[in-house]
Amino acid sequence: MTTMQYTQSSESIGSDLAFDISDLVVSFGVGNEVITPIKGLDLQVPRGQFLCILGPSGQGKSTLLRCMTGLQEPTSGSVKALGQEVEGPGHRLGMVFQQDAIPMWQRVRDNISFGPRMRGVPKSEWEPRVEHFIHAVGLSGRERAWPKQLSGGMRKRTAIAAVFANNPDILLMDEPFGSLDYFTRATLHNTLLALWEETQKTIVFVTHDVDEALKLADRIVIVSNGVIGADIAVDFERPRSDELRMNPAANEMRQVLLDQLESKVEI
Amino acid sequence: MSTATTVRRARSFDSKLRTKARTWPLFIGALIALVVWEIIAQTLGKASPQASQVLPSVTSIVTDGFTGLSNFFRGGFGVSSTANGSETSVLGAVLALLVNGFITVVRVIAGLVAGVVLGAVLGFLVSGVRPLRYSLTGVAELMRMLPTLAMAPLFTLWFGATTLASIVFIIFGVMFIIFVAVTNAVRNIPPEIIEYPRTLGISKFKLYTSVIFPAVLPEIRGPLMFGGLVAWTSALASELYGIQSGLGWMMGETLKFSLVGQMVIVAVIFSALALLTMRMLSWLINRATVWN
């Protein structure tokens, strides 16, 4: 395991941790085979951090994220969110999926208010939040549209606003921008970072794109072969522009990350 | 504004590409069919005097055959039945078609609605419990593949020659189609569609009513239309066995007495009503899945 720069401060224990994962093992049967994507993984995530989980496909990063949301039950070990064991999905752990998971039969505004409405939160409480996040993600004027009438980027904006409007403590995102074009991604990165700075929520963001991770993260961990293979603090000044590409320190870090990833790729 | 116009234009072009059924070509098609029928019937009629027994001309169907239908009217609305010695009349014929048509439509709609509701409720319940799903879908698949029409006499035997027998028979035909469709559709929902609401923290009940139910609607569109068709054929089959009312009964009687002209009229009315209810069903489904 390569640990660089990032060290856990001694104060951030207990409920200061958004996530405290120890000795996590996940295995399940696929056909006649038993596969073990997570093999004794430890990870601590302080509150408010923007963490990127980086790694090639098939190394267990999505399984790890599913354990963190409670959608996947660990075989052994423990996943604690904000000091409590995660025992299933719930509104405190919001999730943005890679695919379009928002209900297509709800108009944009109804989609963004879907979570609080379905949970029976009083309208007076959710309405201002919903209006705020419709505006914050740039969907003003499209509130009455059906999701099918929107572009892929607009649907992602809806999904992001919907998760924020449901007011979770932590946001988990599984390659949310994977299917979008370069420019749409770049603008969505800025939208997401603005929301993160405004709400101060912990974000765990899974990606296989090194540049995306460098632009977004406070910290990057590489999941390889079911454990944390590298843990790197990213302390470039924010807001980070695309000039990060010219920054020598960023280039150096990119090279380190790419070397790490390259050694893990199974062909 | 200009974008709105573009969108509208794009849509009209799109609808031209799709072969969406319009009303006026249907009428033209029907008119052409009638003219062709008339020409064939007239030509055959000149060749052989018996030909009109098999293929009567359209004009003779409308003039001679139609009033004969008043024999199927049992009296009421100020018009007395031919069984009481009244002459056959146009009004009697119209009333016979209206009353029996209404009876058949009521049977079809009652059976269809009950069959869809029963099949869907059972389908949703069973989808939640995996072992139950596996055991019941197998049985339902078998039932669906049975030639249900062959069981029509059995239902008359069980429930008598009654409207109830007809409705139960339609339910029997429709229910398994919808049941199998719903369980398949629920199984085919992509996992993230169900996982996302769970991460929002919504209850299991709300998950069924507000997510799973609307999510399957587009996929059961085809089976619903098929169910509508099965409801009509089942109604016809049930009315052919013993029941003394409905368009199916009229058709059976006209066949028994070789009243070809009347048979054609009943068949046309039957088809028109079936078409109308299928259009309504399609409209309802479109309304419910407008987001798709």
Image (spheres, rainbow, N blue to C red):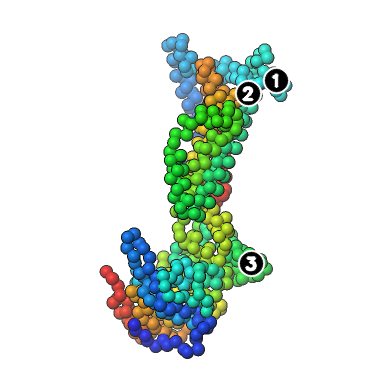
Give the mark toward the camera: 2 or 3: 3
Q: Say if B32 sits above or below B259 in the image.
A: below
Looking at the rendered structure, the kind of residue marked 3 is Val
Q: Report how many numbered discs are placed on residues in the image.
A: 3
Residue at mark 2: B96
Q: CA distance from mark 2 to mark 3?
A: 58 Å
Letter of the chain that mark 1 sits on in the rendering: B
Q: State the residue at coordinates (46%, 39%).
A: B143
Residue A260 place in picture, x, y as percent? 32, 79
Q: Nearer the viewer, residue A119 or A178?
A: A119
Q: Say if B171 sits above or below B200 in the image.
A: above
Q: State the residue at coordinates (42%, 73%).
A: A76
Q: Nearer the viewer, residue A197 or B25?
A: A197
Q: Residues within 10 Å of mark 3 (few under 14, many from 20)?
A: some
Q: Secondary structure at mark 3?
A: loop
**Pointers 2 and 3 in contact (C-beta within 8 Å):** no
Looking at the rendered structure, the kind of residue marked 1 is Val
Looking at the rendered structure, the kind of residue marked 2 is Ala
Residue B37 place in picture, x, y as percent? 47, 22
Q: Return the residue found at the far left.
A: A267
Residue B160, visible in the rendered structure:
yes
Residue at mark 1: B79
Letter of the chain that mark 2 sits on in the rendering: B
Q: State the residue at coordinates (50%, 70%).
A: A87
**Quadrant placement of the C terminus of chain A:** bottom left
Residue A123 place in picture, x, y as percent? 66, 66
Q: CA distance from mark 3 to mark 1?
A: 63 Å
Residue at mark 3: A121
Q: Say if B115 sits above or below B242 in the image.
A: below
